[in-house]
Structure formats: structure tokens, C-alpha cells
Image (tube, coloured by chain):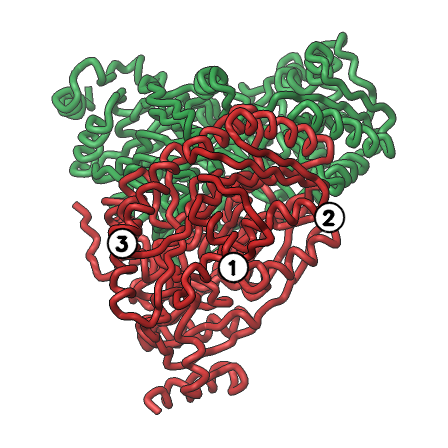
Chain colours: A red, B green
Amino acid sequence: MKNQALVKDLVALIGPDKVISEELDLLCYSYDSSFKSRNHRFVPDAVVTPRSTEEVSKIMKYAYANNIPVTPRGAATGETCGAVPVRGGIVLDLSTWDTIEEIDTSNMQAIVRPGVVHANLNKELAKYGLFFPPDPGSSRMCTIGGMVANNSSGLRAVKYGTTENYVLGLEVVLPYGDVIVTGGMKSRAIKNVSGMNLTKLFVGSEGTLGVITRVRLRVWPKPKARGILMAVFPDLEDAPQTVLEVYQAGILPAGIEILDDSAIKAVNEYKPEINLPDAQAILLFELDGNPASVEWEGNEVARIAKKRASQVEWSTDPERMAQLWEGRSVTAAAAARVRPDGSRVFAGEDISVPLSKVTECLRRIKELGEKYGVGVVNYGHIGDGNVHTAPVIDPESPEEIERVEKFADAIHRLAVELGGSTTGEHGVGLVRAPYARLEHGPAVDIMLLIKRALDPKGIMNPGKLLPEEEEARVS
Amino acid sequence: MKNQALVKDLVALIGPDKVISEELDLLCYSYDSSFKSRNHRFVPDAVVTPRSTEEVSKIMKYAYANNIPVTPRGAATGETCGAVPVRGGIVLDLSTWDTIEEIDTSNMQAIVRPGVVHANLNKELAKYGLFFPPDPGSSRMCTIGGMVANNSSGLRAVKYGTTENYVLGLEVVLPYGDVIVTGGMKSRAIKNVSGMNLTKLFVGSEGTLGVITRVRLRVWPKPKARGILMAVFPDLEDAPQTVLEVYQAGILPAGIEILDDSAIKAVNEYKPEINLPDAQAILLFELDGNPASVEWEGNEVARIAKKRASQVEWSTDPERMAQLWEGRSVTAAAAARVRPDGSRVFAGEDISVPLSKVTECLRRIKELGEKYGVGVVNYGHIGDGNVHTAPVIDPESPEEIERVEKFADAIHRLAVELGGSTTGEHGVGLVRAPYARLEHGPAVDIMLLIKRALDPKGIMNPGKLLPEEEEARVS
């Protein structure tokens, strides 16, 4: 066993019950939900499951002294290899450290350890009429630590923003084992402009700067009411125009989702009983707030949508809302079935573009699909331009894999060309790191300078977020 | 003239009309709105008024090569010496560079140069039904560049957050003159998790990491309606309890302001016709949204407030709203008049504490006022615990100055003790830098590491934000 000495050391540090070293077990830590890790296995040398800041600190001190890469991991629901150890070394499995330390109702805050599952936190918060607004699709699996590391969000980001908007402070174990608290050592303040904003620097840094061991979140009062509006558009162009007019009417919906004709077709083939109307686009608006507000806004959005839509329906009835939403909720599953021998793969799946470019973007993704011979289903969060493209291929065919990789590359370049980003919410990880300079230009040098200042040995989640092999080009 | 060589060089770089060097003119750049700069003058060696990124870059390259401190300056409305050159050198006056480059209505964004005045931007945005929500009291003077550098906000932060929530990207000239764009070089995306979050690192860094030369802001649809509710409380404790119950009812007001008995007294003495009721606390709630929502929430807040208040009034009539709000709007002016021979000074004026500690905080500030013999008026943004204390002293008396400095020091320490921050929205600058380690502990070392990585010669706004003389204590 090549990792025998390492395992022995780790056992001495934190005890045998928190160290995983059997080859078969290690294999389980060699992938996340990404397409990339389906095709390449990244096996760690050892996995540890610390349950205290002290244990994480001990491990980091040891890893730093011995130049061993460390990859923090939550539930590994990510699509970018963010939580897989591409250089081997130690995986810090934080998913078992799932303590909700406090729901501080009088200050509307939640203090949690990194392994708390998103849905569990919101279940606990609901007891007090509170909620943590970001809503990733993986809610029932993903951890708060992972959400912070990726700055995760979901379809309600258009109104509520992303995870970073709710992180008030973090406890972080640095690459060399020191522990810091951002946002004020003993703070329970909501508002604070003291010092450099380290909190937001760590949010979304994908485990490349340190290990998040505690999160102080601001939470919000849960809205009392919601409603769903479905609008069907014969012309694709009419969808973004309608969204814009809704904004111009002073309305900020909690979510605005689009299914284009490819998604409509996929849903109808997958579940004919849903029977979505044949159209170029369907928009789904979610409105939330107090009951009076939701009713007012529902009527107003309906009025606006009717200018262009062939069909509009608005409901606040829970059963009917679920039906209206069903097309959207089965889209991902439906996409996976558009080819009997195919699977939906996560590649080029998360670009964002300006709202004004959504139509062009959807058209050009279709053209790219034709060019590379890749079947595509398009849906996403049109309200903030976050397009989810689902390529469907035979994942066992090396030739199809090569084609979809070219297709994904073209989508990433398209996003940047249209004034967008290679990733709206899923993150960079290993798969989008090569686009860093294309998207950010010389700002990458500053990211590399900061990386080097905080992690001089480059042991924290190497290979992720940044093109690490490059030297910073500083004049 | 000791700065003759410097002035000659600057004139050669950007032309004589953009260089200010007369001694009397330089004096105008030696202070901001702070108490500190009232007592100490910090005179620059030269002032420049660049109007292009290239000019800023030229100046930074020159300053870097010659080790000359550079202090960026907007409208100098700050209370912390943030924009005054405490080590001399060059002041970059960016206030004349006030171009609104674009209101991108289809993507709900505004692209501005740093000198644009906040109120002017909102006036322009209003033409399109949009607004930039942060609302500093200095709206008619302060610049967007200054707001970004300080992460400014105001009384609506409780619902809308601070400036950082709206900054999508920045153009920044680095200390050595290179130019980067954060948030994506050509991006107009709203949602983006690509790369390290440099945008948020520069927001609130108070000019210590680089010069902000362009700002890409997300803006929001302007709410259609608003209403004001005033509630009068015989018992101070009842004020935060009422705020908490409003939150628990699922309502997030745009603003929640408090006047304690000291502020009520000051207002009534200043303008007897306002005739605020005699009480321990008055709360003012601002509610905004669509008309139906505002009405619903106004009634609900009134119902909650009536449980404890001796008097509650709710209005959506513009004239009556202005009357209800008048007590709050004159508080700062009223505070300045509580002593005929005195002035309100900005010292210890911006702490934030957890909502659960607001009552204790107000009581203890009064005790501190008695201990140090300083008259105090208290008001602030109770919704997020941001307490504005107005000490009133004779600013010509060295003895009173010494006492108020001790008083302010005690308030800053009280804030940290209560789990709050030395500054909720005004910033650190020179005056709160000494508290960095008290508030942030070892996180200060990481701030210093980042400062050194980006500004190795320490020329960017030295003396601000961080205790710069300290070496980072990294193990």
C-alpha cells in the first residue's frame, strides 16, 4: 500500500475511525457528479472525516509540512471536479460534520458546520418562519460548506442573489493550519464594513484558499405566499422581451425559467400526460411575498405576458402550481431520455449570458449542436441569463465524448463572446479552469498572486479554479 | 516649493490643467468630513484630476517607480480620513470624472466612471424606472467610486443590502499601473461564479489595493409604492422586540429607524413644531413594493406595533409620510444644536451591534456619555443594528476633544464586546484602523498578506483600513 506511511500518520493525528484508506473506499472519493470524473478517476491517497476545527488544523499542518495536496469535499454533487483530488493526496470529507450549532432567531442568523445539508437547514429554519434563500437543485444532498465554496445558487437567484449574499462570516483553516474568523471574530452583526472583505474572497474560492469549518449565515423571513405563472410563446424572441417588461413594471419575480422547443419536446416525450403546448418557448414565473403582493404581481405579469403569449395561466393554488411547474421540474430527467441509448452529460451546462443575448445564445447553441452532431435540450434561469444546456450522448462512445467536449468548448467560448460567463452557478473546478484567462484576462494574475500569498506551497485543492501552472504575469 | 519636481513630472504626464499644486488649493484636499481631519491637516504634495484610465495608469506607474503614496478621492464626504493623504504624496481627485457611460436597460445595469454622484445616477436611472438601491445620507454629494471603495449603504440596507450587492464588475488600476477588469473582461452577465471574487475584494478596500476607474452596477426596478409607519414606545426594550416580530411575520421593511429619548428631545428642541411624543423610543418603518403589498404590510406592521406602542400611525400619503419622517430627517441637524456652544462630531458614530443587543448598546452608550461627560444623541438603522451616536462637544476645546476621543474609543470597544463591529457603513480609514486586530484577530494577517501581494511598496492609500505598520504574523 503506497499510502501506508500517510495513513499511519493521519491515524496518529485524529484516530483510526476518522481515516479511510481501503482501496475500494478511496474509489468512492475519486469522482463527483461531473462528466469529467466519469471519464477520469482521481483517486486520493487517503480520506479523513474530521469533526472539529482542531482536527482540520492538525491535518493541514501535517499536509503543509509534508507538501501533500488536500481537497475539501462536501457531498460531491458538483459538476466540475471541484471536490475530487486531481493530484491525489488527502480528501477532507466534511459531509459528516453536519451540526447546526445555532438558529439565532433574534438576529436572524444560522451558525452551521460545513457538512449540514441544505434541505435540512431549511427544514430547521422553517420552524421559526425563516429560510436560507439560495436554492440549488441538489438541495437534498448538497452541503452548506460546498455551497459556500462554490457560491451556489439556483433558480431564485434572480431575486434573492447567491450564497455570498447570505454569508456574514466564516471560520477558515488556512493551508498551513492557522485558524481565522472572517467578518469579525465574535461578531453577530448583520452590517459591517470593517477590514478587507475576506468573507467574500473565500466564498466561491472552491477550496483553493483554505478549509471552511464554520459558516455564519444571514437568513430571511419566509415569504407567506407564492404563485406560478406559465406563458407560452410562439416566437422565441418574445420570451426575453416579456421578462424585460416585467422588470420594467417594477416586479422582481423569485424565479423566471425558460424551456425552449427542445426542452418542450423532451418533456412531452418523457411524460406525455404533462402535454406542454407546442411552442418556441415557455416561461414560468414564480412570484413570492405577502399574499396581497403575490396576487397583484401575478395579475400584472399576466397582463404583460398576454401581449405576446399565445397562452397564459396564473395560479396560487398549490396543486395547480405544481402542475404548471411540472414541465420545468422534469426537464433534467426528460433531457436524459431523448435518446434511448443516450445519457445527459454535464458539459458546457452552465453558461450565463446577458438577458439581451439569451435568444441569440439559444439559437447558436442549437447550431453548435448541429455542427458537432450533439443532441441538445435547453432550459435555464432566463431571469439572470443562466442557460442550462443538456447535451445528450452515448457516454460509452469515445467518439461521441470527443464531439461533446468540442461542443462544450465552443459553448464556453460562445458565452464569453456574448458578454457572459463560462459558469453562472456550477463553478470552475477543473473543467473550466482553462478558460480563466479568456474570461478574466490580466485579472487572473491577481488571482494567482492571492493564491500564492495564502497558499505558498499550492497544496489547497490544486488544479481548480485557476490555471495554476501559469506564472503570474506581473509587470 | 518642495514639490516642484513632482509637479513638473505630473504635468509632463497628464498636462498642466489636470495638476493642482498651489498651497492654498492643496489645503482643500487635506481633510474630509471626519472629526480627525478637523484636528489634523493632511496636506498632499500634489493633486491630479485624471479623466481616463490611461492617465490613472500613467500616474500609478510613475508613483510606483518613485515610491510616492497615492490617495484616491471622491467627494471626501467620508468620516474616517479615508480620502486624505496621511503620508502626503499624490491625491487622485476622481470627482470630476463623472461620466455615466451607459444605462443598459435591457440588462438592468449601469456603467459609470468613479466620479458620478449618487443622486445623479439615480436621477438618470429613474427615467427608465430603475434605481441603485444603496442610499447614503450624502447622496447629493458622494460619488459611486467612493461608495464602492467604502461599500457604502444607508437606511435601506436592511432590505436592499450594501453597495457590494450591486457591483458586478470593476475596472481597477493596480498600484504598479496595470489595468484589470473584475467580473469578466467583457461581461454584461448578472450571474457569474467564474474565478476568485476580486470584485468583492476591491469593494470596501478603501483605495488600499488599487484605483477604481469604472464600475458596472446591477440596478433594480424601482418599487411603485411606499409607506411610512411611526410607532412610539414608552419602553426602550419594546422597540427591538417589535422589529423582531415584524421580521417573524415575514416582512422585510426597506428601512427601520430608531430615535431614542435623546434624539426625541433634540428634535423637539430643534424644531418644536415637529412635536414628537415624549417616549423612550420612536420607530419609523419604511415599506416599499407594489401598492397592494405596501398596504398589506403597513396594516400588518401596525397590528404588531400596537401590541407594545402607545401610538402608531401608518400612512401612504406623500405629505403625511414626509411629516412622519421629519423627526428622523432632522435628527443629525438637531443633534448639532443640543448645546448652543457645541457641535456634533463624528467619533464612534457608526458602530453596529446584533439586533438582540441594541437596547443594551443604547443604554451603555448613555452611561459612557455620563462617564466621559459627553452629551450624546442616539439614532440609527435599528433594522440591522447600525447605531449612529452623535456626541456633541465644543470642538475648539482640547480638553473636550480628549474626552470625546476616549468616549469614542470606549464605544468602539463596546461594539466589539457586544458582538458587533466598530463600523457598520462609514468605514475604517485612519480612525478605526487601530481596532482591526481587536475585531478581526488573526484574520488581519491575511489582510496584510493580500495587501502586500497587491501593493508590495505600500503606496496605495497608506495608513488606512489596516494596521499597516504591523508585520503579518504568519506561522
Percent coordinates x, y for residue A368 in the rendering:
28, 49
Q: Nearer the viewer, residue B407 or B130?
A: B130
* Among numbered discs 2 and 3, the one appearing first in the sequence: 2
Q: Which amino acid type corresponds to the residue marked 2 in the rendered image?
A: Gly
Image location (x, y in percent) of residue A408: 30, 55
Give the number of the mark in front: 2 or 1: 2
- Could you tell whether A398 is left or right of B430 in the image? left
Viewport quadrant of the N terminus of chain B? top left
The answer to whether dots 2 and 3 both sit on one chain is yes
- In the image, which disc is placed on residue A409? 3
Could you give the CA–CA distance between mark 2 and mark 3, rounded to whole angstroms?
A: 44 Å
Q: Quadrant of the C terminus of chain B?
A: bottom left
Question: Around disc 1, counting alpha carbons within 10 Å, would you say few (fewer than 14), some (14 to 19), or many (20 or more)?
Answer: many
The earlier-in-sequence mark between 3 and 1 is: 1
Residue drawn at (26%, 35%) of the image: B173
The residue singled out by tag 1 in the image is A171
* Residue A343 visible in the snapshot: yes
Residue at 39% from the left image edge and 20% from the top image edge: B116
* Label 2 element class: loop
A398 to the left or right of B236: left
**Residue behind mark 2:** A129
Which residue is situated farthest in the left direction here? B12
Residue A404 or residue A64, whichever sits in front = A404
Picture quarter containing residue A33? bottom left
Amino acid at pointer 3: Asp
Q: Is residue A311 left or right of residue B472?
A: right
Instruction: State the image coordinates of residue B66 (x, y, percent, origin top left).
Output: 17, 36
Give the Cα distance between marks 3 and 1: 36 Å
Given the image, what chain letter belongs to the residue carrying mark 1? A
